[in-house]
Image (cartoon, rainbow, N blue to C red):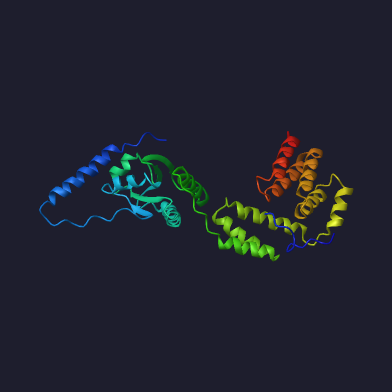
Amino acid sequence: MKQLDPRTAPSMFTRGAVDLGAIRDRAAAQAKAEAAAAAGAPAAPAPAPAGGAIVDVTEASFQEVMERSLTVPVLLLFSTEWATEAAELRAELERLATESDGAFVLGRVDAEKEPRVTQAFRVQSVPTVYAVIGGQPTPGFEGVIDNAQLKQFVDAVIKAGGGEPAEAPEDPRLLAAEDALMDGELDAAAAAYGEILKENPGDAVAQAGLAQVELLRRIAGVDPNAALAAAEANPDDVAAQTLAADIEVLSGNAEQGYNRLVALVRRTAGAERDQARLHLISLLALAAPEDPVVAKARRALASALF
């Protein structure tokens, strides 16, 4: 077996019910009063219907927005001009709404300018997000959450409304990192994945990519035959066994590598056992969670530990 080349190695890669009746009645009364005041005078142009992906919700337009929720989910974002921490959340919701191709509507509510709408939803702090599906409001969350959690929440709302979430566009930074990885430019790949994780520490793809970079770094320049022979001769040497497991995983013999480390966990104790356990977990993170071999290895590890 010749030395492993990263460029040719296989790729792993609540609050109570919301009182809506009163606000609906006030909106209807306001509309009637305006119509009566305009009697005998030329009719003023009707306001544009709330037909876009992003709408500003007022007391006057509230009923129309609620009616839209009968056909498409509506997310209501309660915020204020001074809530600077909500600016990024608002921008990300606007981006998701625009890219959703009509899968949901974002309704922006100024909590200070629209106190009755805000009170109807019993909003206690800003930012607060509510989902309205089929005319029924459901509390979403208060405060700011990261983009990955926000996307999961939006997708769940769209699915609850009977729609299909839009596929997220491919992040060009991920493509660049993967290109660098396949070209063996490990420092460039690590830097690219690191930048993504600074912005979104929970990005599973970037986490797996960085783990693969570390794996490739560990086996760079290693003679696989010599490493496997050293592991065979030194069954309790943690460094030799973990390196052999790296080679087996990268060579397509993942199950053999997992079994090697599970056996090492059984034979060792203390810091050495912990090192073997953590190394196995890092290798399992490279594979798809639904892989039956991965599930089997996780069960075996749990059995070895307990």
Viewer-proximal residue among 302 and 40 = 40
Q: Quadrant of the C terminus?
A: top right
Residue 142 to residue 91: above or below: above
- Tell me if I can see residue 274 in this picture: yes
Q: Quadrant of the N terminus?
A: bottom right
Picture quarter containing residue 180?
bottom right
Name which residue lies at 52% across and 50% down. 148
206 to the left or right of 16? right
- Residue situated furthest right in the rendering: 233
- Tell me if I can see residue 127 in this picture: no
Residue 109 to residue 190: above or below: above
Viewer-proximal residue among 126 and 101 = 101
> What is the tally of numbered marks visible in this picture?
0
Residue 6 to residue 58: above or below: below
- Residue situated furthest left in the rendering: 40
x and y, in percent, of residue 269 in the image: 78, 38
x and y, in percent, of residue 162 in the image: 45, 44
Name which residue lies at 41% across and 40% down. 139
271 to the left or right of 154? right
Name which residue lies at 75% across and 57% down. 218
231 to the left or right of 165? right
x and y, in percent, of residue 211 in the image: 68, 54
5 to the left or right of 18? right
x and y, in percent, of residue 109 in the image: 34, 49
